[in-house]
Amino acid sequence: MVEIPAGSASAIPAAEVADMELYHPKSWWTKYVFSQDAKVIAVQYALTAISIGLVALVLSWLMRLQLAFPGYFAFIDADRYYQFITMHGMIMVIYLLTALFLGGFGNYLIPLMVGARDMVFPYANMLSYWIYLIAVLILVAGFFVPGGPTGAGWTLYPPQAVLSGTPGGRDMGILFMLSSLIVFIIGFTMGGLNYVVTVLQGRARGMTLMRMPLTVWGIFTATVMALLAFPALFVACVMMLFDRLLGTSFFMPAIVEMGEQLQHGGGSPILFQHLFWFFGHPEVYIVALPAFGIVSDLISTHARKNIFGYRMMVWAIVIIGALSFIVWAHHMYVSGMNPNFGFFFATTTLIIAIPTAIKVYNWVLTLWRGDIHLTLPMLFALAFIVTFVNGGLTGLFLGNVVVDVPLSDTMFVVAHFHMVMGVAPILVIFGAIYHWYPKVTGRMLNDTLGHVHFWITFLGTYAIFFPMHYLGLLGVPRRYYELGETAFVPPSAHSLNIFITIMALFVGAAQMVFLFNLVWSLSRGRLAGGNPWRATTLEWQTPQTPPAHGNWGKDLPVVYRWAYDYSVPGAPEDFIPQTEPARDIPTREVVA
Amino acid sequence: MAVVLILVLLALGSVVFHILSPWWWTPIASNWSYIDTTLIITFWITGTVFVAVVCFMAYCVYRFRHKPGNRAAYEPENRRLEWLLAAGTAVGVAAMLAPGLVVWHQFVTVPDDATPVEVVSQQWLWSFRLPGADGTLGHAETRKVSAENPLGLNTDDARGLDDVIIEGGELHVPVGKPVHMLLRSVDVLHDFYVPEFRAKMDMIPGMVTYFWFTPTRTGTFEILCAELCGIGHSQMRGTVVVDEAADYQAWLEQQSTFTQLVASGEPQTTD
Ligand code: HEM
Ligand SMILES: [Cu+2]
Ligand SMILES: [Cu+2]
């Protein structure tokens, strides 16, 4: 460990301060709307993502109503049902989770946690948000074009995505979806380059890579992955647009569309699936890794104990990130690709379970001999572990190629991915909001409302998705507008569907409690002070709360220790901020 | 303490649900009981891990929850424990993967004596084609599809003339004889799925995909489409009947060959 004299912060060149002045906001517009402050951009990202996420939530109620009471709601016809599925899935994965974790939490936390004044390219950062907003608006516009949005499923598989049997295939819907994705990726790239360069170049003195909080590691790795994975989706979207608009045949073989021979020929629908999942699988980890990182910090802070096996945790994140680029075809075991690929992809997929399991062990071992405060962030972290372990374990069914054969494309898959990449990351998002809201607003969220929200969300989502696996095991396919009379489906399965729907409506209602809490606490919440959780990381050591533009006042912070000096023996308090010089209270950090 | 109790109840409740669940796989009707076995192994291993992790967590919360004056231990890492756990996980993973890959090898190795059966899908209908007396299917492709020739048989290929064509009707297969399902689509993706056979495979325009199985008991089974193929997806059903050999022959004799269909003008021949 390098000793850094306390005075060295003044070695920062004077010019930096002058530059800062240049981009301080001069008016209300540049402060709150066209802001270049990563913290404001973060809030903009978060509010936009949550708003569009609510649309996806409402769509899930409508789908569930149809599944429980088929035909009862006349306006949910097959066209609409498939449009709802598609928009729900796409919004949840891309426009809510990806945008919220990277654009929202990434923007807020990276500069603060690594001790930077802001992102390194604030202007591109601002553009990133506005382009994201345009992507969201194009997506929403899709609801209002003739024919409505696309109903091709969130996977947008051709050829059906661009043909007439699918809602929006021959209309505008698919065009709006593809355009929106293309715009999203452009916007994301601007933000993503920022996050990566800021982590690599913008860290405060003493903040070595192996001292960074795992939150930063998670978001950083996810961003690198996204920068590598999104281009595959980008080209796939462009190619599909060409097929649809210019008559090319990238994904289009000879086809008879409703009795009529089309001009296309020679293309490969499976090529699209490879491109899609080359993006799509890493995408799962793009939302999972930030959640992994954040939850590690929540557990450590609220159990007052260092995260167990920090170095292993970092390497696990990096290894999972790398491996996730060679497992994509486990989504395609029954796609008709050469079945011999199954051997390779099943092996890589099950290998990924090992670093993932290590993360789980280290989370629960962090609780061991901790001093566990059952705060809301801690409760959400515990709920995350339960949900994530459940969903991760069913992944071992679907990853093990031959076991996937009966289960793929059934409700088992729907249950699995909702647990592992739907509910689990959302639980972390909630935990993170309860944790960092005091820093963002200066006030605490209401605890009672929080508990109501927590219990209904945790137990409710488990009640929705746990039994759903068994419908899949029975053989109920996913993406079915209605099951109709199916010989092997007993009447009790319909009762189960009704139960699941009621739970889904409950869980949905609980989210309104959460939204109310967010707004109410803004003015009525208990004042938080600068460091209500007595946490070590830099964002809690800012001179003001909420932090001002530029984050740190006159001098940048200097880091003397890792992010996890909780309950250090001999220290007067049970936490030592990263800015505490080591000569006063020694750290026990393990140096790589 | 509510947290501890609820975590334990959740873990145990999941196990009880699993045991009591009336929703379980359909009685198997093919040789792929190995798949069921692998699935059961996976259930045991993953179920144990799930209960262990959740209960361990519950115990930690019970034992180490905050009380005034408590202080957490300080232990950044424990190399031995970490590697031990990693190794243990690797063993568990191998225990699932190994049988899985063995069965997959069987799944992708079509026996030589398997009878070819072609399934052709279109929005939203299943059709079938069986080899005629010559035992082979004639060449067919999407470009040749027309109202008169819905499966797109190549009329220049003599091997196809005796092929048995079933458009939109029931498929019959004899019990105990391996079948090689050859899957074709003329428009979009579909997926041939019979839950009782445990097998499914996507059907892709421009390609022939396949799987094989041996029906092990007679009965009537529902074919479902398992790949989103447009608004008719959930209505795209078919029927496959597994027959005793004699019943199968009787059924087969009533079916029409391609030549007969063309001659009878049903599907209509216009030229
Ligand atoms: C309580 C909350 C939720 C409920 C009740 C719900 C419900 C549903 C339902 C009913 C389906 C259609 C299943 C089918 O028949 O195929 C679906 C699909 C889907 N959901 Fe959710 N969902 C919820 C939350 C989420 C979240 C948080 C995500 C984020 C990843 C998500 C991602 C998806 C995806 C990707 C699909 C697949 C869409 C497709 O098949 O194209 N959902 N959801
Ligand atoms: Cu179909
Ligand atoms: Cu279908």
Image (spheres, coloured by chain):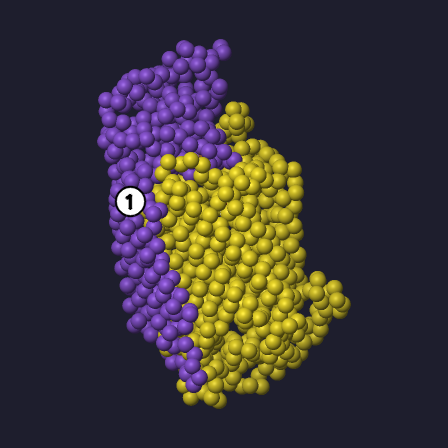
**Residue at x 34%, y 18% (from the top left corner):** B255
Answer above or below: position of B269 versus A84. Answer: above
Q: Nearer the viewer, residue A474 or B262?
A: A474
Tell me what hue chain B is rendered in.
purple
How many marks on residues?
A: 1
- Is B101 left or right of A38, judged from the image as shown? left
Answer above or below: position of A585 versus A46. Answer: below
Query: What SS does tag 1 mark?
Result: helix
Residue A452 appears anywhere in the view: yes
Q: What subunit carries mark 1?
A: B
**Residue at x 54%, y 67% (from the top left corner):** A450
Classify mark 1 as within 8 Å of ligand 3 or not, answering yes or no: no
Q: Give the percent coordinates (x, y) of residue A228.
A: 50, 54
Outermost residue on the right side: it is A27
Answer above or below: position of B29 versus A444. Answer: above
Q: Which residue is mark 1?
A: B35
Q: Residues within 10 Å of mark 1 (few under 14, many from 20)?
A: many
Quadrant of the image for the N terminus of chain A? bottom left
**Residue at x 55%, y 47% (from the top left corner):** A62
Q: Give the percent coordinates (x, y) of residue A134.
A: 66, 52
* Residue A147 figure quarter: top right
Q: Nearer the viewer, residue A287 or A248?
A: A287
Residue A366 appears anywhere in the view: no
* Residue B149 figure quarter: top left
**Residue at x 70%, y 69% (from the top left corner):** A23
Tell me what hue chain A is rendered in.
yellow
What's the amino acid at mark 1?
Ile
Q: Give the percent coordinates (x, y) of residue A526.
A: 61, 76
Q: Nearer the viewer, residue A239 or A173?
A: A173
Quadrant of the image for the C terminus of chain A? bottom left
Q: Give the percent coordinates (x, y) of residue B250.
A: 27, 19
